[in-house]
Image: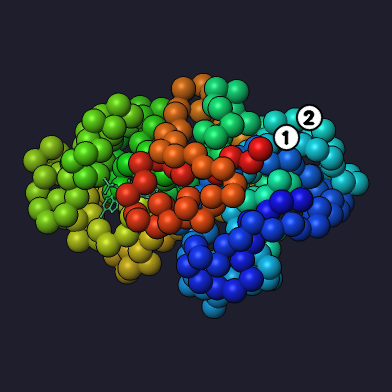
């Protein structure tokens, strides 16, 4: 099968389109014919070697944890899926090797969910990692109806989904982005504010009583978070371990298919959108990485697999 691989750590220049053997489909595994995969910052952070201290990787590695596709075959005792099923996955396995930037990927059943009916293939591929991150953070923080949440990084993959999940829970959402993305944030249901110097003041102008919850989907925002959090407020970050020193929770998204299914159902129920900034063909995966590395993707960058 065709796949994007890298055989050493480095920049997107180490990526190449190659031929790889078809993945084996062991007990409890499902073989998925990939329709689309999406780029997450963690993909190029792994590729650069930043996670080498705590994450095993086997070269040549196929990058990519996000996938949408159709079940091609199932292994022994994989009773929950059948050939022809349309599925999505945050396909993080125990070590980095056989990812989603390929024609096929084999995944344990427990990582799979059914594709939302309301989303196209490229949109579906953008949902799992970013959406599940936002879903699990807002769950852990116990965000409830009527509360106000500040989302740092509202226009990125995680933030744009986080806003909509919070809105679906009838929470009031304030979210940060640069000016050019403020109309986008409004369209998702958030009150936009600009990030940078004076952020705390701008949020307090909107909510003098403080916000109940802060979800940091960018990092480097601890000062503003503590400035705007109400007395009993809760906060978490996915990109800043320092929050733990100040009563917050530092989180890493957990690949749980059953929770991804809850999210997929929420997407269908509430018309949650996945904003896709660009879709590129598999052969141009390196450019997809380069665009995301600029740090200003609105929503998701997707790679489609013919
Ligand atoms: N711990 C975990 O489990 C976990 C899971 C997923 C992601 N992450 C990490 O979380 C971060 C975000 O992930 P992502 O997938 O959402 O990334 P992304 O889609 O690439 O984020 C791009 C967005 O970030 C916004 N942005 C850049 N600097 C900002 C700032 N200072 N304040 C507010 N917004 C800013 C940009 O908005 P403008 O263009 O308007 O500037 C852009 O829309 C990454 O570092 C990623 O590695 C961690």
Which residue is rendered at x = 63% and y = 51% of the image?
101
Asked if the residue under mark 1 is in contact with the one under mark 2, i.e. CB atoms within 8 Å, the reply is yes
Any part of residue 265 in sight: no
Q: Is residue 145 left or right of residue 119?
A: left
What residue is drawn where x is 51% and y is 42%? 280
Vertical arrangement, residue 271 with respect to residue 176, above or below = above
Q: For marks 2 and 1, give the CA distance.
A: 6 Å
Task: Quickly name the residue at label 2.
Answer: 84
Secondary structure beneath label 2: loop
Could you say where residue 223 lies in the image, as x and y percent from the top left?
A: 20, 61
Give the x, y percent position of residue 161. Answer: 42, 38
Furthest toward the right, the residue is 76
CA neighbours of label 2 inside 10 A, class few (<14), some (14 to 19), many (20+): few
Position of residue 187 measured from the top left corner of the image (x, y, whole percent): 30, 26
Is 173 located above or below residue 217 in the figure? Answer: above
User: Which class describes the residues within 10 Å of circle 1: few (<14), some (14-19), or many (20+)?
Assistant: many
Give the residue pinned by disc 1: 70
Q: Quadrant of the C terminus?
A: top right
């Amino acid at each position: 099968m065709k796949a994007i691989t890298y055989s050493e750590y480095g920049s997107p220049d180490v990526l190449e389109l190659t031929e790889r053997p078809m993945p084996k489909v062991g007990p409890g595994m499902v073989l998925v014919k990939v329709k689309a995969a999406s780029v997450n910052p963690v993909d190029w952070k792994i590729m650069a070697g930043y996670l080498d201290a705590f994450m095993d990787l086997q070269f040549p590695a196929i990058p990519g944890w996000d996938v949408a596709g159709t079940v091609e075959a199932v292994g022994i005792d994989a009773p929950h899926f059948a050939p022809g099923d349309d599925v999505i996955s945050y396909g993080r396995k125990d070590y980095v090797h056989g990812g989603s930037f390929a024609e096929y990927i084999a995944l344990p059943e427990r990582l799979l969910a059914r594709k939302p009916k309301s989303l196209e293939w490229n949109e579906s591929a953008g949902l799992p990692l970013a959406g599940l991150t936002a879903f699990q953070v807002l769950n852990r923080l116990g965000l409830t109806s009527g509360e106000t949440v500040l989302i740092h990084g509202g226009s990125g993959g995680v933030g744009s989904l986080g806003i909509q999940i919070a809105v679906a829970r009838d929470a009031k959402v304030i979210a940060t982005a640069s000016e050019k993305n403020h109309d986008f944030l409004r369209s998702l249901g958030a009150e936009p504010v600009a990030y940078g110097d004076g952020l705390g003041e701008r949020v307090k102008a909107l909510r003098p009583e403080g916000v109940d919850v802060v979800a940091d989907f960018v990092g480097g925002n601890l000062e503003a978070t503590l400035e705007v959090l109400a007395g009993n407020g809760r906060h978490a970050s996915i990109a800043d371990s320092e929050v733990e020193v100040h009563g917050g929770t530092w989180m890493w998204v957990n690949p749980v298919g059953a929770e991804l299914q809850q999210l997929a159902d929420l997407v269908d129920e509430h018309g949650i959108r996945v904003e896709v900034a660009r879709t590129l063909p598999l052969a141009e995966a390196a450019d997809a990485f380069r665009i995301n590395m600029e740090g200003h993707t609105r929503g998701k960058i997707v790679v489609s697999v013919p």
